[in-house]
Amino acid sequence: MIIIGERINGMFKDIARAINDRDPGPVQEWAKKQEYNGAHYLDINVGPSSTEPVEAMKWLVEVAQEASDLPLALDSTKYDAIEAGLKLCKQPAMINSVPAEMAKMERVFAMAAEYGAEVIGLAMNEEGIPKDADMRVGLAAELVATADAFGISPDMLYIDPLALPCNVAQDHGPEVMRTLREIKMISDPAPKTTVGLSNISQGTKNRELINRTFAVMAMANGLDSAIADACDDELMAAVASARIILDMDIYCDSFVDVFKQRNR
Amino acid sequence: MGLTGLEIYKHLPKTNCKDCGSPTCLAFAMALASGKASLDACPHVTDEAKEALDSASAPPIKLVTVGTGDHKVELGEETEIFRHDKRFFHPTGIAVLISDSEDVAAKAEQFDDLEFERVGMHYITDMVAIKCDSGDAGKFKEAVETVAGKTEKALILMTEDPAIMEGALEAVADRKPLVCAATSDNFEKMTELAKGKDCPLVVKGSDINDLAELVEKVVGLGHKELVIDSGARETSQVLADLTQFRRLAVRKKFRLFGYPALAVTTKDDPKEEIIQAGVYVSKYADVVVLKACEKQQLLPLLSWRQNLYTDPQKPIAVEAGLYDVGEPGEDAPVYVTTNFSLTYFIVEGEVESSRIPSRVLSVDTGGISVLTAYADNKFSAETITEAIKKCGLEDKVKHKKLVLPGHVAVLKGTLEEESGWEVMVGPREASGITKYAKDNFAGGVS
Amino acid sequence: MAVEILKEKYRSKVGEVVLGATKEDGGTRSHTITVGGESALPYLHFEGEIPNRPVVALEVWDIVPEWNPCFEQYYGDVYNDPGAWAKKCVEEYGADLIQVRLKGADPDLKDHSPEDCAATVKKVLEAVSVPVMVIGCGKADKDNTIYNPIAEAAAGENLVMGVGELENYKAVTSACMANNHVVIAQSPIDINICKQLNILIAEMSPAMSTRIIIDPTVAALGYGIEYSYSIMERARNGALQGDKMLAMPMYGNAGFESWRQKEANISADEQPGWGEQEERGILWEATTAMAYLQSGIDILVMRHPEALKAIKGNIDDLMKNNSY
Ligand code: SF4
């Protein structure tokens, strides 16, 4: 499972302050920490309140790359900010994200093709997030077909079926699981899948338990990656175990350490 | 594996007319891919699209049969790249080459005798290829008839001249030989001949691209019982081509390579030739044609084929019974183990390196290891006692002592009661046997 | 028609390990050998690099071995002299390197002392200039006493030493660590233990993680070879897909395993249905080695000079480029 470390996000106070003061300290600390704990990508998000998203993104990208060699996932709804960031990335990055809306897909896929970037595609459109799996899969298929038209191979796409908080939208849970399974039938190679893991537990008690339970259930249904807290040791241990049970890694007695240390 | 949504979508009209009940063609394609709808629901799909979708759901590699009756050889219908993912199904046909310019009758007899008994199994060299080197249609036909008269095994007829092929094929068509080969120069005639006699046909390209083109043409002429050959003869290139055939057919459903593959050796030294053939057996050839024809040369190759095509999910059993290690006498020790082949061979190897002639009693546990069989009650006082009786152990040794694997020491009491034999508890791991034997049996069993 | 060639995109590759050391690096070998480094499945040059050809060793014992009589004509005159034996293997039979098996250390055989063992290794090192591998007698208690003296006596030579097993890897690993040798990590036809053992050795010293050779315990043709074959295929796939703890070069002794078997040894008189003995034995060994090569082995140990010759010819063929 590919872990996209979620911590460099202006939503968090320390990062917001760092962006504001142009203080690389906290950003680089989190970059290193997440890498050390087994993240494969670093999510980079300037946060909702940024007044200068393009400049902030450029700064974050540069500062993060000084501290870590991990590829970046540029996370913004402002495509100009993403494009500015892509120009600075030393290795192919990921674009987070695009919904199945034609205008946005055209902008993002053109950019992805130009910079060789992977793309997170959201199973939603102008009408919002559909409830049932068939509709979600249909939107996923549109993302794949449109990307294909831009010469982007389906396995460059990470489809997010969009999990909603389980305390308010419990009936979405099984639909998300089914969506994950059926996305693999869209094409060969199949698109990859991802989720924003902590969405599932917004506003609930015992968030970490819900997150990691969701992670292993989703993995059993074909989840390839998650935007998650790489420093959550219990989560990483659960993911390591799931990988063994699903025959994705070869077992050995030190399997948890091996999973966490694979990037070191 | 079924078709993906995108593959289906490419064959749909893409008008999003909603007549099928789905909001878009793409959504309908996804419903088809996940088995929730049937293609009939779209009234606008063309016949070509229907056929394309049908053939795409056929197995990735076609099953082709050469020969008839008990001696037929089934080739292809493989589904895996690695045997550990599931298994390989139809063992490579091993064909010995006979030239029409050598002593055909003698070699045919020698060929027909290339069968072996080994560890309770029977290995057969299952195909024979007759090649026209003389350029003489009469001579070739005579050679083919001679071979056909000497062996009932599956035949391969090798000439690229349709005029020479015709007579020979006529003579043995009822044996369903493999016609070898159609090339870009002769494919129309060769296809007509093979198709007319309902015989499988080798399509031989000058490289992988040329082959694809040629297969398309031959299929276009209506013949589908095909075996493919890229024409490459260098070991490394053949390995690459055979790998591409298997990968493209299995992973990409590339129809033009969805046929069994043939490889031909080039080495003149028989040892080098067997190794070269071994590479092709390992990596995806469905037929290998070679010249080597001595027993000591074929036995290793056929053993490798047998090993490679076993089912990795199924434990492999040796035949249960009593095995001699060295030349054991009346006072030789007796070791008891299961008939799981790996366990048995390890025990046998260790007993052998003790250099004390012994017997190993392999108990029928359905091919599972000592501890698993014990837990399953298949390695118990009863089954061991039965095995002792069945093999007539009592008449072969004058003592009444058995060595039991240390892991199942708990069986000692009940086994002694049940069988009347004295049970010695051996080491837990086979690696301890050599020392154990030297400590206990240096002077025979007392 | 241009066929779209299917090439795997692998994330990683097998690590390279250097065997032997020349004068510049504190040894006395005329050259070193690098094994590993593959970024493709065996000999699929079209999808990656196979930078180093697999190498083939012949084995030299420190006692007269009880091998099939057919070996008499090749080694009979040197059975008593490990140095001369090694020299013959390299100069006449074309071995890339030598494996010394200190069988005589076995307490039940000659019980050679650790000093004797070190002297034998020294003798072989003086007789040949190729890299050398050293294997104990197979009895762990005794072997643990000989590793250090040998490692010290040959300090700087970058030997390959073995074997370390899950229950007994520390002695040989520390001997290698202290004197910069390479260790053979042996697991009993079990990929999980194979991986765990590599982890444990790497934990003793991170520097050792690039000085490990995997011995997955190979079986002979007809005697479980398919298990070894699949384990090596899985390990190599794992390595290419990024499993660093399986990304070491692999080693196997085709000679030793094959010549233990009836099929290699039994005479044609006793088993007329199987054909002539010596050629059958040679091919039993060479076919075994061929299968190891196809599953990804990097270091082969052979016994019969004719088998070695055939397999080297096969390696020459397999190393030819097959890019599209
Ligand atoms: S009926 Fe056929 S053409 Fe019309 S939407 Fe459905 S699939 Fe498309």
Image (cartoon, rainbow, N blue to C red):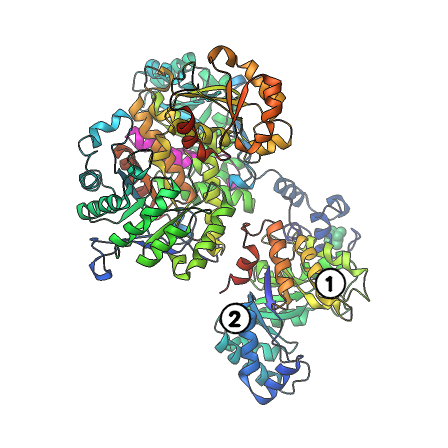
Side of B4 where B205 appears, left or right = left
Amino acid tagged 1: Ile
Numbered disc 2: secondary structure: helix
What residue is pinned by disc 2? A115
Write the start and end of the magenta stretch as one range.
Answer: B256-281
Label 2, label 1: how far apart the Cα atoms are: 36 Å
Q: Relative to the observer, which residue lies in front, B359 or A38?
A: B359
Crowding around mark 1 (Cα neighbors within 10 Å: few <14, some 14 to 19, many 20+) is: some
What residue is pinned by disc 1? A210
Q: Is residue B115 magenta?
A: no
Q: Position of residue B88 (x, y in %)?
A: 53, 35
Numbered disc 1: secondary structure: helix
Side of A48 where B298 appears, left or right = left
Q: Position of residue B328 (x, y in %)?
A: 40, 17
- Quadrant for the C terminus of chain B in the image: top left
Please tell me whether residue A12 is drawn above or below residue B422 in the rendered image.
below
